[in-house]
Amino acid sequence: MQSWFTFELDGEECRVEKEDTHCSLASYLYRLDPCFRGFSGHDPWQGGDPVVLGDIEGDRHRFRVVDAGLIMLPMLAGRQVWTSEGIQNTEPDHPVNLALRKNHFECGAERIGALRILLFEGYYRPDLRRQGQINDQFDSIVTRTENAPAIRDAAAQVFASTEQLRHEAAQKAEKSGQESGIWTGRRDIFEDRFTKRLFQIKERAALSYVDGAKKRFYRPDTLVELLRLKKQYPNSRFVSGGTDLTSLSGEVEWPNLISLEAVKELNTFLTTEEEWEIGASISLTEISELIGRECPAFPKLMRRFACRAIRNRSSLGGYLASDWRNSQITPLLLALNARVILLSEDGERDAPISQFFEETGSIILAPHEVIRSIIIPRSNESVLAGRGITSVLTDVYTVAPRRNLSRPYATAAFSLEIRDRTIAKARLAYSGIGTVPARAREAEEFLAGKVWKEATAFDVLPILNETVEVDDSQEHAAYRKQLVVTLFQKFLSQHPRPDSTRPEALTATGEFAKLDQPFFDAIPS
Protein backbone atom coordinates (compact mmCIF):
# COMPACT_ATOMS: atom_id res chain seq x y z
CA MET A 1 0.00 0.00 0.00
CA GLN A 2 1.10 3.57 -0.55
CA SER A 3 1.12 6.32 2.07
CA TRP A 4 0.74 9.19 -0.41
CA PHE A 5 -1.25 10.33 -3.41
CA THR A 6 -1.59 13.49 -5.46
CA PHE A 7 -4.40 15.67 -6.71
CA GLU A 8 -4.49 18.99 -8.52
CA LEU A 9 -5.29 22.05 -6.44
CA ASP A 10 -5.92 25.31 -8.30
CA GLY A 11 -3.83 24.14 -11.24
CA GLU A 12 -0.87 22.87 -9.20
CA GLU A 13 -0.02 19.32 -8.14
CA CYS A 14 -0.64 18.75 -4.43
CA ARG A 15 1.00 15.79 -2.70
CA VAL A 16 -0.76 14.30 0.32
CA GLU A 17 1.27 12.05 2.62
CA LYS A 18 0.09 10.08 5.68
CA GLU A 19 -2.96 12.29 6.17
CA ASP A 20 -5.88 10.78 8.10
CA THR A 21 -8.22 8.82 5.82
CA HIS A 22 -11.15 10.56 7.56
CA CYS A 23 -9.73 14.04 6.95
CA SER A 24 -12.04 16.26 4.91
CA LEU A 25 -10.81 18.54 2.15
CA ALA A 26 -12.05 21.56 4.12
CA SER A 27 -9.96 20.60 7.15
CA TYR A 28 -6.91 20.00 4.98
CA LEU A 29 -7.21 23.33 3.16
CA TYR A 30 -7.66 25.19 6.46
CA ARG A 31 -4.29 23.87 7.62
CA LEU A 32 -2.60 24.21 4.25
CA ASP A 33 -2.57 27.96 3.70
CA PRO A 34 -3.85 31.12 5.47
CA CYS A 35 -5.80 32.08 2.32
CA PHE A 36 -8.08 29.09 3.03
CA ARG A 37 -9.02 30.15 6.57
CA GLY A 38 -12.61 30.50 5.42
CA PHE A 39 -12.94 26.70 5.47
CA SER A 40 -12.88 26.64 9.27
CA GLY A 41 -16.60 26.88 10.09
CA HIS A 42 -18.09 24.07 8.00
CA ASP A 43 -21.84 23.57 8.28
CA PRO A 44 -23.50 21.58 5.46
CA TRP A 45 -26.96 22.78 6.57
CA GLN A 46 -25.88 26.39 5.91
CA GLY A 47 -24.48 25.80 2.42
CA GLY A 48 -21.17 24.23 3.45
CA ASP A 49 -17.79 25.04 1.92
CA PRO A 50 -18.25 24.83 -1.87
CA VAL A 51 -15.36 24.09 -4.23
CA VAL A 52 -15.30 22.84 -7.81
CA LEU A 53 -14.30 19.25 -8.53
CA GLY A 54 -13.01 18.43 -12.00
CA ASP A 55 -13.82 14.84 -12.85
CA ILE A 56 -14.83 12.44 -15.61
CA GLU A 57 -18.24 10.76 -15.65
CA GLY A 58 -18.26 7.99 -18.20
CA ASP A 59 -17.00 9.76 -21.32
CA ARG A 60 -18.06 13.21 -20.12
CA HIS A 61 -15.68 15.65 -18.45
CA ARG A 62 -17.50 17.80 -15.92
CA PHE A 63 -16.97 20.53 -13.37
CA ARG A 64 -19.11 19.84 -10.29
CA VAL A 65 -19.63 21.95 -7.20
CA VAL A 66 -18.99 19.85 -4.07
CA ASP A 67 -18.88 20.54 -0.35
CA ALA A 68 -15.24 20.50 0.79
CA GLY A 69 -16.38 19.48 4.27
CA LEU A 70 -18.20 16.40 2.98
CA ILE A 71 -15.52 14.85 0.81
CA MET A 72 -12.67 12.78 2.21
CA LEU A 73 -9.18 13.62 1.12
CA PRO A 74 -8.31 10.21 -0.44
CA MET A 75 -11.34 10.54 -2.70
CA LEU A 76 -9.51 13.32 -4.55
CA ALA A 77 -6.60 11.19 -5.76
CA GLY A 78 -6.10 11.91 -9.47
CA ARG A 79 -8.74 14.63 -9.57
CA GLN A 80 -8.82 18.41 -9.84
CA VAL A 81 -10.03 20.90 -7.24
CA TRP A 82 -10.64 24.59 -7.85
CA THR A 83 -11.27 26.99 -4.99
CA SER A 84 -12.76 30.46 -5.34
CA GLU A 85 -9.31 31.97 -4.85
CA GLY A 86 -7.84 29.73 -7.54
CA ILE A 87 -10.55 30.64 -10.07
CA GLN A 88 -10.11 34.33 -9.36
CA ASN A 89 -6.30 34.32 -9.62
CA THR A 90 -5.85 31.88 -12.51
CA GLU A 91 -7.88 33.84 -15.06
CA PRO A 92 -8.97 37.27 -13.73
CA ASP A 93 -10.74 38.16 -17.00
CA HIS A 94 -12.87 35.02 -17.02
CA PRO A 95 -16.58 35.92 -17.58
CA VAL A 96 -17.41 34.70 -14.07
CA ASN A 97 -14.81 36.95 -12.45
CA LEU A 98 -15.88 39.91 -14.58
CA ALA A 99 -19.51 39.44 -13.55
CA LEU A 100 -18.60 39.45 -9.87
CA ARG A 101 -16.40 42.50 -10.33
CA LYS A 102 -19.14 44.61 -11.91
CA ASN A 103 -22.11 43.81 -9.70
CA HIS A 104 -23.17 44.59 -6.15
CA PHE A 105 -24.72 41.58 -4.44
CA GLU A 106 -24.95 42.97 -0.90
CA CYS A 107 -23.11 40.05 0.69
CA GLY A 108 -19.75 39.36 2.32
CA ALA A 109 -16.56 37.88 0.89
CA GLU A 110 -17.51 34.34 1.92
CA ARG A 111 -20.78 34.50 0.01
CA ILE A 112 -19.05 36.07 -2.98
CA GLY A 113 -16.70 33.10 -2.98
CA ALA A 114 -19.65 30.69 -3.00
CA LEU A 115 -21.27 32.69 -5.81
CA ARG A 116 -18.06 32.45 -7.85
CA ILE A 117 -18.01 28.66 -7.40
CA LEU A 118 -21.66 28.23 -8.44
CA LEU A 119 -21.37 30.65 -11.36
CA PHE A 120 -18.26 28.79 -12.51
CA GLU A 121 -20.00 25.41 -12.57
CA GLY A 122 -23.03 26.90 -14.31
CA TYR A 123 -20.86 28.53 -16.97
CA TYR A 124 -19.61 25.10 -18.10
CA ARG A 125 -22.89 23.16 -17.69
CA PRO A 126 -24.12 22.04 -21.15
CA ASP A 127 -27.65 21.49 -19.79
CA LEU A 128 -28.10 24.94 -18.25
CA ARG A 129 -30.26 26.51 -20.94
CA ARG A 130 -33.22 28.40 -19.45
CA GLN A 131 -34.01 31.09 -16.88
CA GLY A 132 -35.87 28.71 -14.55
CA GLN A 133 -32.70 26.72 -13.95
CA ILE A 134 -31.03 29.61 -12.12
CA ASN A 135 -32.87 28.67 -8.94
CA ASP A 136 -31.58 25.12 -9.31
CA GLN A 137 -28.00 26.34 -9.70
CA PHE A 138 -28.10 28.77 -6.78
CA ASP A 139 -30.48 27.03 -4.38
CA SER A 140 -28.02 27.09 -1.47
CA ILE A 141 -26.87 30.69 -1.85
CA VAL A 142 -29.76 32.99 -2.78
CA THR A 143 -31.27 34.15 0.51
CA ARG A 144 -33.13 37.17 1.79
CA THR A 145 -29.87 38.65 3.05
CA GLU A 146 -28.57 39.15 -0.48
CA ASN A 147 -29.59 41.00 -3.60
CA ALA A 148 -31.21 38.04 -5.33
CA PRO A 149 -32.33 39.99 -8.45
CA ALA A 150 -28.74 41.17 -9.03
CA ILE A 151 -27.47 37.61 -8.68
CA ARG A 152 -30.02 36.34 -11.20
CA ASP A 153 -29.25 39.13 -13.66
CA ALA A 154 -25.52 38.48 -13.46
CA ALA A 155 -26.06 34.74 -13.84
CA ALA A 156 -28.28 35.23 -16.88
CA GLN A 157 -25.57 37.32 -18.56
CA VAL A 158 -22.85 34.78 -17.81
CA PHE A 159 -24.93 31.82 -18.95
CA ALA A 160 -26.06 33.67 -22.08
CA SER A 161 -22.43 34.17 -23.08
CA THR A 162 -21.65 30.47 -22.82
CA GLU A 163 -24.84 29.55 -24.68
CA GLN A 164 -23.88 31.87 -27.51
CA LEU A 165 -20.43 30.32 -27.59
CA ARG A 166 -21.96 26.85 -27.70
CA HIS A 167 -24.35 27.86 -30.48
CA GLU A 168 -21.53 29.26 -32.63
CA ALA A 169 -19.42 26.13 -32.03
CA ALA A 170 -22.35 23.90 -33.00
CA GLN A 171 -22.81 25.80 -36.27
CA LYS A 172 -19.15 25.20 -37.15
CA ALA A 173 -19.34 21.52 -36.15
CA GLU A 174 -22.56 20.89 -38.08
CA LYS A 175 -20.75 20.37 -41.38
CA SER A 176 -18.53 17.64 -39.93
CA GLY A 177 -21.41 15.88 -38.15
CA GLN A 178 -19.91 16.49 -34.68
CA GLU A 179 -22.64 18.81 -33.47
CA SER A 180 -23.86 16.41 -30.75
CA GLY A 181 -20.52 16.59 -28.98
CA ILE A 182 -21.03 20.33 -28.54
CA TRP A 183 -24.46 20.14 -26.93
CA THR A 184 -23.56 17.22 -24.65
CA GLY A 185 -20.31 18.79 -23.44
CA ARG A 186 -18.12 15.99 -24.75
CA ARG A 187 -16.01 18.49 -26.71
CA ASP A 188 -14.03 21.38 -25.27
CA ILE A 189 -15.48 24.50 -26.89
CA PHE A 190 -13.94 26.88 -24.34
CA GLU A 191 -10.26 25.93 -24.63
CA ASP A 192 -9.35 28.05 -21.62
CA ARG A 193 -6.95 27.17 -18.81
CA PHE A 194 -9.66 25.41 -16.85
CA THR A 195 -11.10 23.16 -19.55
CA LYS A 196 -7.70 22.30 -21.02
CA ARG A 197 -6.75 20.81 -17.67
CA LEU A 198 -10.18 19.26 -17.22
CA PHE A 199 -9.97 17.29 -20.46
CA GLN A 200 -6.63 15.85 -19.35
CA ILE A 201 -8.25 13.90 -16.51
CA LYS A 202 -8.09 10.13 -16.85
CA GLU A 203 -10.57 7.52 -15.65
CA ARG A 204 -10.61 6.89 -11.92
CA ALA A 205 -7.85 4.43 -11.06
CA ALA A 206 -7.57 1.92 -8.22
CA LEU A 207 -6.00 3.23 -5.01
CA SER A 208 -4.72 1.57 -1.84
CA TYR A 209 -3.78 4.23 0.71
CA VAL A 210 -2.72 3.93 4.35
CA ASP A 211 -2.43 6.91 6.69
CA GLY A 212 -0.05 7.56 9.56
CA ALA A 213 -2.33 5.74 12.02
CA LYS A 214 -2.46 2.62 9.79
CA LYS A 215 -6.07 3.23 8.76
CA ARG A 216 -6.68 2.12 5.19
CA PHE A 217 -8.60 3.58 2.27
CA TYR A 218 -9.25 1.33 -0.73
CA ARG A 219 -10.63 2.41 -4.09
CA PRO A 220 -11.04 -0.77 -6.18
CA ASP A 221 -11.92 -0.50 -9.85
CA THR A 222 -13.74 -3.84 -10.33
CA LEU A 223 -16.59 -5.63 -8.57
CA VAL A 224 -14.43 -8.69 -8.07
CA GLU A 225 -11.84 -6.67 -6.14
CA LEU A 226 -14.58 -4.87 -4.22
CA LEU A 227 -16.11 -8.12 -2.98
CA ARG A 228 -12.67 -9.52 -2.16
CA LEU A 229 -11.88 -6.52 0.01
CA LYS A 230 -15.24 -6.74 1.76
CA LYS A 231 -14.58 -10.40 2.58
CA GLN A 232 -11.05 -9.63 3.77
CA TYR A 233 -12.25 -6.71 5.92
CA PRO A 234 -15.79 -7.62 7.04
CA ASN A 235 -15.99 -4.64 9.42
CA SER A 236 -15.03 -2.12 6.75
CA ARG A 237 -17.28 0.75 5.75
CA PHE A 238 -18.44 1.36 2.17
CA VAL A 239 -18.31 5.00 1.06
CA SER A 240 -19.50 6.44 -2.22
CA GLY A 241 -20.23 10.15 -2.45
CA GLY A 242 -19.08 10.76 1.11
CA THR A 243 -21.98 13.09 1.96
CA ASP A 244 -22.46 11.23 5.25
CA LEU A 245 -18.90 12.10 6.26
CA THR A 246 -20.19 13.80 9.40
CA SER A 247 -21.05 10.33 10.74
CA LEU A 248 -17.54 9.10 9.96
CA SER A 249 -15.60 11.83 11.71
CA GLY A 250 -15.17 12.76 15.35
CA GLU A 251 -16.41 9.98 17.61
CA VAL A 252 -16.68 7.34 14.84
CA GLU A 253 -13.52 6.01 13.24
CA TRP A 254 -13.39 3.18 10.71
CA PRO A 255 -10.04 1.37 10.33
CA ASN A 256 -10.89 0.40 6.75
CA LEU A 257 -12.86 2.42 4.21
CA ILE A 258 -13.76 1.02 0.78
CA SER A 259 -14.74 3.53 -1.86
CA LEU A 260 -17.20 2.51 -4.58
CA GLU A 261 -16.46 5.45 -6.88
CA ALA A 262 -14.02 3.74 -9.27
CA VAL A 263 -15.89 0.43 -9.66
CA LYS A 264 -16.83 0.50 -13.34
CA GLU A 265 -19.89 -1.72 -12.96
CA LEU A 266 -21.32 0.62 -10.29
CA ASN A 267 -20.83 3.67 -12.51
CA THR A 268 -22.51 2.26 -15.63
CA PHE A 269 -25.78 3.61 -16.99
CA LEU A 270 -27.62 1.24 -19.34
CA THR A 271 -30.68 2.13 -21.42
CA THR A 272 -33.02 -0.33 -23.07
CA GLU A 273 -36.38 0.32 -24.67
CA GLU A 274 -38.17 -0.74 -21.49
CA GLU A 275 -35.97 0.41 -18.59
CA TRP A 276 -32.96 2.28 -17.24
CA GLU A 277 -30.36 0.44 -15.18
CA ILE A 278 -28.54 2.98 -13.03
CA GLY A 279 -25.24 2.07 -11.39
CA ALA A 280 -25.38 2.51 -7.61
CA SER A 281 -22.47 5.00 -7.56
CA ILE A 282 -23.85 7.41 -10.18
CA SER A 283 -24.60 10.80 -8.64
CA LEU A 284 -28.12 12.17 -8.30
CA THR A 285 -27.22 15.11 -10.53
CA GLU A 286 -25.99 12.83 -13.30
CA ILE A 287 -29.13 10.68 -13.04
CA SER A 288 -31.28 13.77 -13.32
CA GLU A 289 -29.43 14.80 -16.47
CA LEU A 290 -29.74 11.33 -18.00
CA ILE A 291 -33.43 10.60 -17.36
CA GLY A 292 -34.89 14.04 -16.59
CA ARG A 293 -36.32 14.80 -20.02
CA GLU A 294 -38.35 11.58 -20.09
CA CYS A 295 -39.02 11.48 -16.36
CA PRO A 296 -39.54 15.13 -15.29
CA ALA A 297 -40.61 14.12 -11.79
CA PHE A 298 -37.01 13.19 -10.94
CA PRO A 299 -35.40 16.61 -11.62
CA LYS A 300 -38.40 18.25 -9.95
CA LEU A 301 -37.66 16.21 -6.82
CA MET A 302 -33.96 17.05 -7.02
CA ARG A 303 -34.72 20.77 -6.90
CA ARG A 304 -36.01 20.23 -3.36
CA PHE A 305 -33.32 17.77 -2.25
CA ALA A 306 -30.45 19.09 -0.08
CA CYS A 307 -28.39 21.50 -2.23
CA ARG A 308 -26.49 21.27 -5.48
CA ALA A 309 -23.14 20.55 -3.81
CA ILE A 310 -24.67 17.52 -2.09
CA ARG A 311 -26.65 16.30 -5.11
CA ASN A 312 -23.44 16.36 -7.15
CA ARG A 313 -21.89 13.83 -4.75
CA SER A 314 -24.77 11.75 -3.38
CA SER A 315 -25.31 8.47 -5.20
CA LEU A 316 -28.66 6.72 -5.47
CA GLY A 317 -27.25 3.44 -4.12
CA GLY A 318 -25.59 5.17 -1.17
CA TYR A 319 -28.79 7.06 -0.41
CA LEU A 320 -30.87 3.88 -0.29
CA ALA A 321 -28.26 2.13 1.86
CA SER A 322 -28.40 4.97 4.40
CA ASP A 323 -31.77 3.66 5.64
CA TRP A 324 -33.53 7.00 6.16
CA ARG A 325 -37.24 6.66 6.86
CA ASN A 326 -37.98 10.23 5.75
CA SER A 327 -36.35 9.52 2.39
CA GLN A 328 -37.40 12.06 -0.22
CA ILE A 329 -36.40 9.86 -3.15
CA THR A 330 -37.89 6.50 -2.15
CA PRO A 331 -41.58 7.45 -2.72
CA LEU A 332 -40.83 8.34 -6.33
CA LEU A 333 -38.97 5.06 -6.82
CA LEU A 334 -41.97 3.26 -5.33
CA ALA A 335 -44.35 5.09 -7.67
CA LEU A 336 -42.14 4.25 -10.65
CA ASN A 337 -42.09 0.56 -9.61
CA ALA A 338 -38.28 0.53 -9.42
CA ARG A 339 -36.16 -2.44 -8.39
CA VAL A 340 -32.82 -2.85 -6.64
CA ILE A 341 -30.13 -5.33 -7.70
CA LEU A 342 -28.15 -6.58 -4.69
CA LEU A 343 -24.80 -8.31 -5.15
CA SER A 344 -22.62 -10.55 -2.99
CA GLU A 345 -20.18 -13.40 -3.50
CA ASP A 346 -23.19 -15.73 -3.41
CA GLY A 347 -24.68 -14.03 -6.48
CA GLU A 348 -27.34 -11.44 -7.26
CA ARG A 349 -30.87 -10.91 -6.07
CA ASP A 350 -33.51 -8.65 -7.53
CA ALA A 351 -35.74 -6.88 -5.01
CA PRO A 352 -38.61 -4.46 -5.67
CA ILE A 353 -38.20 -1.15 -3.87
CA SER A 354 -41.51 -1.93 -2.14
CA GLN A 355 -39.75 -4.82 -0.35
CA PHE A 356 -36.50 -2.98 0.36
CA PHE A 357 -37.71 -1.47 3.65
CA GLU A 358 -38.82 -3.90 6.35
CA GLU A 359 -41.64 -3.14 8.80
CA THR A 360 -39.12 -2.86 11.62
CA GLY A 361 -37.63 0.19 9.89
CA SER A 362 -34.45 -1.53 8.68
CA ILE A 363 -33.55 -2.45 5.09
CA ILE A 364 -33.01 -5.87 3.55
CA LEU A 365 -29.40 -5.11 2.54
CA ALA A 366 -27.21 -7.74 4.26
CA PRO A 367 -23.77 -6.84 5.69
CA HIS A 368 -22.01 -8.84 2.98
CA GLU A 369 -24.03 -7.29 0.13
CA VAL A 370 -23.65 -4.18 -1.99
CA ILE A 371 -26.26 -2.40 -4.09
CA ARG A 372 -25.14 -2.91 -7.68
CA SER A 373 -27.80 -0.95 -9.55
CA ILE A 374 -31.31 0.45 -9.49
CA ILE A 375 -33.69 -0.39 -12.35
CA ILE A 376 -36.41 2.11 -13.27
CA PRO A 377 -39.05 1.14 -15.88
CA ARG A 378 -39.54 3.63 -18.68
CA SER A 379 -42.86 5.05 -19.86
CA ASN A 380 -42.09 6.06 -23.43
CA GLU A 381 -44.68 5.79 -26.18
CA SER A 382 -43.51 2.45 -27.57
CA VAL A 383 -43.48 0.78 -24.14
CA LEU A 384 -46.93 2.11 -23.28
CA ALA A 385 -48.35 1.12 -26.66
CA GLY A 386 -47.13 -2.45 -26.18
CA ARG A 387 -49.03 -2.65 -22.88
CA GLY A 388 -52.13 -0.92 -24.17
CA ILE A 389 -51.59 2.12 -21.94
CA THR A 390 -52.48 5.51 -23.42
CA SER A 391 -50.84 7.76 -20.80
CA VAL A 392 -49.06 7.78 -17.43
CA LEU A 393 -49.57 10.55 -14.86
CA THR A 394 -46.61 10.78 -12.48
CA ASP A 395 -45.68 13.49 -10.01
CA VAL A 396 -43.94 14.02 -6.67
CA TYR A 397 -44.40 16.50 -3.84
CA THR A 398 -42.28 17.42 -0.82
CA VAL A 399 -43.34 19.50 2.18
CA ALA A 400 -40.57 20.85 4.41
CA PRO A 401 -39.87 23.80 6.74
CA ARG A 402 -37.91 25.46 3.95
CA ARG A 403 -37.20 24.77 0.31
CA ASN A 404 -33.67 23.34 0.60
CA LEU A 405 -31.32 21.89 3.20
CA SER A 406 -34.18 20.86 5.45
CA ARG A 407 -35.60 17.55 6.60
CA PRO A 408 -39.05 17.16 5.02
CA TYR A 409 -42.26 16.58 6.93
CA ALA A 410 -43.50 14.33 4.15
CA THR A 411 -42.91 13.35 0.55
CA ALA A 412 -45.56 11.81 -1.69
CA ALA A 413 -45.31 10.36 -5.19
CA PHE A 414 -48.20 9.22 -7.36
CA SER A 415 -48.31 7.37 -10.65
CA LEU A 416 -51.43 6.37 -12.59
CA GLU A 417 -51.36 4.21 -15.70
CA ILE A 418 -54.34 5.20 -17.84
CA ARG A 419 -56.01 3.10 -20.53
CA ASP A 420 -58.22 5.54 -22.43
CA ARG A 421 -59.85 7.22 -19.40
CA THR A 422 -59.70 4.27 -17.02
CA ILE A 423 -56.99 3.74 -14.38
CA ALA A 424 -55.29 0.44 -15.18
CA LYS A 425 -52.72 0.65 -12.39
CA ALA A 426 -52.16 3.06 -9.50
CA ARG A 427 -49.12 3.48 -7.27
CA LEU A 428 -49.34 5.92 -4.36
CA ALA A 429 -46.35 6.21 -2.03
CA TYR A 430 -45.42 8.26 1.03
CA SER A 431 -42.45 8.82 3.31
CA GLY A 432 -42.18 10.76 6.55
CA ILE A 433 -45.65 9.53 7.53
CA GLY A 434 -45.11 6.06 8.95
CA THR A 435 -42.01 4.29 10.21
CA VAL A 436 -40.81 3.50 6.67
CA PRO A 437 -41.60 4.67 3.13
CA ALA A 438 -44.61 2.69 1.92
CA ARG A 439 -47.33 2.44 -0.70
CA ALA A 440 -51.02 3.03 0.04
CA ARG A 441 -52.19 -0.38 -1.16
CA GLU A 442 -55.88 -0.05 -0.24
CA ALA A 443 -56.19 3.21 -2.14
CA GLU A 444 -54.37 1.74 -5.13
CA GLU A 445 -56.81 -1.17 -5.26
CA PHE A 446 -59.76 1.19 -5.07
CA LEU A 447 -58.52 3.33 -7.96
CA ALA A 448 -57.82 0.40 -10.32
CA GLY A 449 -60.60 0.16 -12.89
CA LYS A 450 -62.09 3.59 -12.07
CA VAL A 451 -62.35 6.50 -14.49
CA TRP A 452 -59.86 9.24 -13.61
CA LYS A 453 -61.95 12.29 -12.76
CA GLU A 454 -62.58 14.59 -9.84
CA ALA A 455 -65.26 12.38 -8.28
CA THR A 456 -62.91 9.38 -8.29
CA ALA A 457 -60.14 11.35 -6.62
CA PHE A 458 -62.46 12.62 -3.89
CA ASP A 459 -63.85 9.13 -3.30
CA VAL A 460 -60.37 7.80 -2.53
CA LEU A 461 -59.53 10.52 0.02
CA PRO A 462 -61.34 8.85 2.97
CA ILE A 463 -59.53 5.60 2.17
CA LEU A 464 -56.17 7.36 2.27
CA ASN A 465 -57.10 9.04 5.53
CA GLU A 466 -58.15 5.77 7.16
CA THR A 467 -55.47 3.39 5.88
CA VAL A 468 -52.22 5.38 5.73
CA GLU A 469 -50.89 5.07 9.27
CA VAL A 470 -48.96 7.90 10.88
CA ASP A 471 -46.15 7.41 13.34
CA ASP A 472 -47.46 9.34 16.34
CA SER A 473 -43.99 9.55 17.87
CA GLN A 474 -42.92 12.08 15.23
CA GLU A 475 -43.20 15.83 15.56
CA HIS A 476 -46.24 17.41 13.90
CA ALA A 477 -47.94 14.01 13.53
CA ALA A 478 -51.38 15.56 12.95
CA TYR A 479 -50.00 17.83 10.24
CA ARG A 480 -48.28 14.89 8.53
CA LYS A 481 -51.58 13.00 8.62
CA GLN A 482 -53.31 15.91 6.90
CA LEU A 483 -50.66 15.93 4.16
CA VAL A 484 -51.64 12.40 3.12
CA VAL A 485 -54.88 13.79 1.72
CA THR A 486 -53.88 17.31 0.67
CA LEU A 487 -50.92 16.14 -1.43
CA PHE A 488 -53.17 13.81 -3.42
CA GLN A 489 -55.59 16.70 -3.93
CA LYS A 490 -52.71 18.74 -5.31
CA PHE A 491 -51.92 15.88 -7.68
CA LEU A 492 -55.52 16.00 -8.93
CA SER A 493 -55.31 19.78 -9.42
CA GLN A 494 -52.18 19.46 -11.56
CA HIS A 495 -53.34 16.36 -13.46
CA PRO A 496 -57.14 16.77 -13.75
CA ARG A 497 -57.52 14.87 -17.02
CA PRO A 498 -56.26 11.47 -18.24
CA ASP A 499 -54.04 13.24 -20.79
CA SER A 500 -52.47 15.70 -18.28
CA THR A 501 -49.06 14.05 -18.37
CA ARG A 502 -47.36 17.41 -17.81
CA PRO A 503 -48.47 19.14 -14.59
CA GLU A 504 -50.63 22.20 -14.96
CA ALA A 505 -49.29 25.34 -13.26
CA LEU A 506 -51.26 26.36 -10.19
CA THR A 507 -49.98 29.95 -10.19
CA ALA A 508 -48.93 32.54 -12.76
CA THR A 509 -45.37 32.74 -11.39
CA GLY A 510 -43.86 30.92 -14.33
CA GLU A 511 -45.51 33.23 -16.82
CA PHE A 512 -44.28 36.40 -15.09
CA ALA A 513 -40.80 35.07 -14.31
CA LYS A 514 -40.38 33.71 -17.86
CA LEU A 515 -38.87 30.49 -16.51
CA ASP A 516 -38.89 28.83 -19.94
CA GLN A 517 -37.07 31.71 -21.62
CA PRO A 518 -33.64 30.63 -22.93
CA PHE A 519 -30.54 32.54 -21.92
CA PHE A 520 -29.58 32.88 -25.56
CA ASP A 521 -32.12 32.62 -28.37
CA ALA A 522 -30.45 32.44 -31.77
CA ILE A 523 -32.25 34.46 -34.44
CA PRO A 524 -32.66 32.38 -37.61
CA SER A 525 -30.82 33.85 -40.60
Image: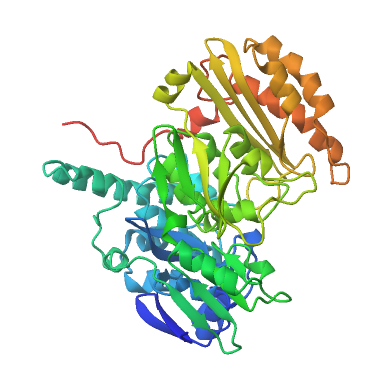
Most extreme residue toward the right is 472
Q: Identify the residue at horizontal 56%, vertical 80% (top origin).
A: 216
Give left or right: position of 361 versus 497: right
Q: Nearer the viewer, residue 59 or 277?
A: 277
Percent across and percent down for residue 298 are: 53, 39
- Looking at the image, how many numbered discs can be counted on the residues? 0
Most extreme residue toward the left is 175
Give left or right: position of 413 versus 432: left
Colour scheme employed for the rendering of this structure: rainbow
Percent across and percent down for residue 143 are: 60, 52
Residue 236 in view of the camera: yes
Percent across and percent down for residue 516 are: 42, 33
Percent across and percent down for residue 391 are: 50, 19
Q: Give above or below for 330 relative to 89.
A: above
User: Picture quarter containing residue 471?
Assistant: top right
Residue 109 in view of the camera: no
Q: Identify the residue at horizontal 63%, vertical 63% (top origin).
A: 244
Q: Nearer the viewer, residue 272 or 179?
A: 272
Locate the C terminus by quadrant: top left
User: Picture quarter containing residue 380?
Assistant: top left
Q: Give above or below for 324 relative to 352.
A: below
Q: Nearer the viewer, residue 463 or 34?
A: 463
Give left or right: position of 33 versus 46: left
User: Picture quarter containing residue 354?
Assistant: top right
Q: Identify the residue at horizontal 56%, vertical 38% (top origin).
A: 338
Q: Nearer the viewer, residue 432 or 266?
A: 266
Q: Identify the residue at horizontal 28%, vertical 68% (top origin).
A: 200
Q: Give above or below for 493 relative to 343.
A: above
Most extreme residue toward the front is 346
